[in-house]
Amino acid sequence: MIRNDRIRRVLAIFGNKTLPESAVPQDARFH
């Protein structure tokens, strides 16, 4: 079930690529 939460967060981050550079560190953390 934990993977589902991570997937949802990752999808949200990829879907919010329009956000400022502040979203880059979060995406890097998931990777």
Image: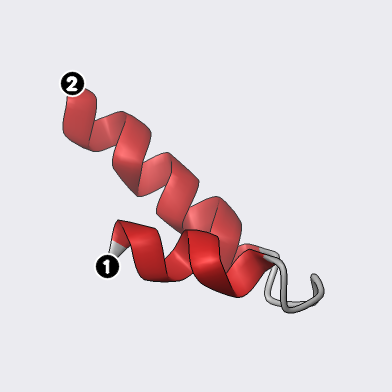
Helix, strand or loop at label 1? It is loop
Residue 16 or residue 20, whichever sits in front: 20
How many circles with numbers are drawn on the protein? 2
Q: Is residue 26 left or right of residue 4?
A: right
Q: What residue type is labelled 1?
A: His
Question: x, y percentage for residue 22?
Answer: 71, 68
Q: Is residue 8 above or below residue 21?
A: above
Q: In this view, does 3 lie to the left or right of 24?
A: left
Specify few, some or many for label 2: CA neighbours under 10 Å numbering under 14, 14-19, or 20 or more.
Answer: few
Where, by quadrant of the figure, is residue 8 drawn? top left
Q: In which quadrant is the C terminus drawn?
A: bottom left
In percent of the image, x 33 and y 58: which residue is there? Answer: 30
Helix, strand or loop at label 2? It is loop
Residue 5 or residue 26, whichever sits in front: 26
Question: x, y percentage for residue 11?
Answer: 48, 57
Which marked residue is nearer to the observer: mark 1 or mark 2? 1
Residue 6: mark in rendering: none
The first of marks 1 and 2 along the sequence is: 2
Question: x, y percentage for residue 18?
Answer: 79, 77
Residue highlighted by disc 2: 1
In percent of the image, x 51 and y 59: which residue is there? Answer: 26
Q: Are marks 1 and 2 in contact (CB under 8 Å)?
A: no
In percent of the image, x 33 and y 47: which residue is there? Answer: 7
Q: Is residue 22 left or right of residue 4?
A: right
Residue highlighted by disc 1: 31
